[in-house]
Image (cartoon, rainbow, N blue to C red):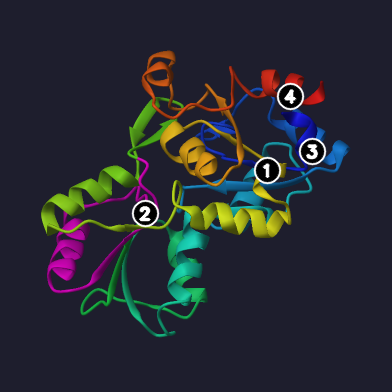
Amino acid sequence: MYKQIKAVIADMDGVLWRGSEPLPGLVEYFDFLFERRLEFALATNNSRNTPVDYVNKLAALGVEGVQPRHIVTSGTATVSALKNQYPAGTGIYVIGGDGLKQLLIKAGFELVEREAELVVCGIDFDLTYNKVKTATLLIRAGARFIGTNPDSSFPSPEGLVPGAGSILALLESAAGQKPTIIGKPERGMFDAALRQLGTSAEETLMIGDRIGTDIAGAKALGIKTALVMTGVETEASLRASAVQPDAVFAGLPELLEALRV
């Protein structure tokens, strides 16, 4: 399977790190990519940070050479999708981190608290009842409801904690409307990564820790898949899943061993 691989897409949370703690094999993984001159993209459903934030985080963890162009987030994918559909100046109410807000402002959108045309929701570590209340009223008043990603949980050093999908579920229940999802498993993020890489799906490997988004979305496009068991999945959830990855590894060191062979 790996002889055909010319490029790699990897998730970050649960694959490269958990919270601020690097996972085993992180630096060695990038050393391998640079040594073999493999094209790579880092595709995360986490919309909280900007590509530059992730470049800085990797540098702090000992990984140099990653550029913002290597990073695709559900935030960048959401902004790209909205720019194709709405003009600059469109009013948006945001539940999410500063990174998502910065990307929307840079794209020319106006962040508003009332009379919004769109409600965009991602992971928000400072979520309050008032934010949910405002979003609910705006959606019920006709604002389009956009979700950056459907991940119900988020891997942290303490364990799995609520993710953007949990906030979306709360808003869906309160507003009576389902969100339009932009991030994985939808194809927009994978298409963006493949465009950046310049490779076909058959020549590309997706490394992820979540079957329902990383693996399912990649397989739907014909991308080869490798699941690492350092994120959200367990042996039980893997056995129970109708979607199965092409390969399963305990973590990055075991995956690297297979890639080197």
220 inside magenta stretch: no
In the rendered structure, find residue 66 and report the number of the disc placed on it: none
CA gap between label 3 and label 4 equals 10 Å
Q: Earlier in the sequence, mark 3 or mark 1?
A: 3
Give the residue type at disc 3.
Leu
Residue marked by disc 2: 122
Give the residue type at disc 2.
Gly
Say what secondary structure mark 1 lies in. helix
Say what secondary structure mark 3 lies in. helix
Q: Nearer the viewer, mark 1 or mark 4?
A: 1
Residue marked by disc 4: 256
> In the image, is 114 to the left or to the right of 158?
left
CA gap between label 3 and label 1 equals 18 Å
CA gap between label 2 and label 1 equals 31 Å
Say what secondary structure mark 4 lies in. helix
| Res. 51 in view | no
10 Å crowding of disc 4: few (<14), some (14-19), many (20+): some
Residue 133 sits in quarter: bottom left
Q: Are marks 1 and 4 in contact (CB under 8 Å)?
A: no
Residue 139 sits in quarter: bottom left
Give the residue type at disc 4.
Leu
CA gap between label 4 and label 2 equals 32 Å
Magenta stretch bounds:
123-151
> In the image, is 84 to the left or to the right of 222?
left
In the image, 184 versus 139, the foreground residue is 184
